[in-house]
Image (tube, rainbow, N blue to C red):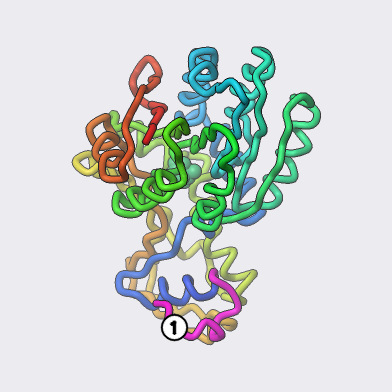
Amino acid sequence: MKNQPEIMFESAFAEDTFKGLTSNPKYLLSKYIYDKNGDKLFQQIMDMPEYYLTSSEFNILELNAEDIVVSFTSSNGIDLIELGAGDGKKTKILLKKLVEKGHTFDYLPIDISQNVLDELKLSLEKEIPEAKVRVQQGTYFKTLEKLSEYNSRKKVILVLGSNIGNLSHKEAVDFLEHIARAMSKEDMLFMGFDQKKHPQKILDAYNDPAGITEKFNKNLLVRINSELQGNFDPNKFLHWETYDPETGTAKSFLVSKEEQKVNIEKLDLKISFEAWETIHTEISQKYDDSVVEWLADEAGLIVEKSFADKENSYKNYIFRR
Ligand code: AVJ
């Protein structure tokens, strides 16, 4: 991979899109859903009644805020580092509790989207002016390298929202390993994992009748059109969701409703679709305790504690090295 001529492509988005659409079967990477439009659509998803993940985690944090915050703290304060911070709606519960209990901390939210970070910073200045905040833009892998630079006091790393679910188990272990490597003995990792549950509930969360998730998924095509001068007609694709209860993997696809050709000018690429040919766009992995323990073990981490909602539909785990 390292030897590929990078000059051929104007961006990682261009290169990954070229690779995905010339593969068989075709795929696109879900991280590229999150441009300004995608961020907005994800905000709308989090407000949908069908998307139980957000309210489940919100309730877990609210019910256990005191316990959680107590386990976070250290006599000389902490650096609270959040990967994929988003709007920080759930994190604010913990920040408020830290302030209320008089704990010393810096909050360091990291997100791929600068828009999201700008808004987060503004809202925190208003809602929790006591909090010391330093935002950082970047992808997970870039930010993981920076993690070990924070080593003057206890680090607590947050990954909420079951964001790990977009990774295959192999990628998840790799991600956890990178985090583990940057952790010292007293550091902690606090992470949300959506749990296996009634398959219909999962399908409903990723296939809402209002079509918000469909728009979110199709934003990949819209983004290719606007940034790479493509001519996808999103109406000629079907949003399709599957869930395999054995593996716990929810998968999103765009399915071509007819035979068609698409032109992407900036990639100098013409792609043909057969009728009913697929583009795989996203996985949203669901977990149980034994899978989480296995992932942790593979990455050299130990599960110290977990917090669940009433139905065990979602869990937050504390990991240590
Ligand atoms: C942000 C990765 C947790 O997979 O549940 C929501 C993204 N995709 N609806 C998820 C998403 C479709 C979400 N994560």
As for residue 193 lying within the magenta part, the answer is no
Looking at the rendered image, the quarter that the C terminus falls into is top left
Q: Position of residue 91 (x, y in %)?
A: 59, 29
Taking the spot 44% from the left edge, 83% from the top edge, the residue there is 4
Q: Examine the rendering and report whether any part of residue 102 can be seen.
A: yes
Residue 201 image position (x, y, % from top left):
35, 31
Residue of label 1: 4
Q: Tell me: residue 285, above or below residue 303.
A: below
Q: Above or below — where is 143 with respect to 195? A: below
Q: What residue is at 51 percent from the left and 35 percent from the top?
A: 158
Region of the chain picked out in magenta, as a range: 1-13
Q: Between residue 75 and residue 311, name the one nearer to us.
A: 75
The answer to if 3 sits in the magenta stretch is yes
Residue 59, compared with residue 47, is above or below; it is above
- As helix, strand or loop, the secondary structure at mark 1 comes to loop
Foreground pick, 2 / 283? 2
How would you rate the neighbour count of disc 1 (Cα within 10 Å): few for under 14, some for 14-19, many for 20 or more? few
Residue at 56% x, 85% y is 7
Is 183 displayed left or right of 147 in the figure?
left
* Image quadrant in which you'd find residue 274: bottom left
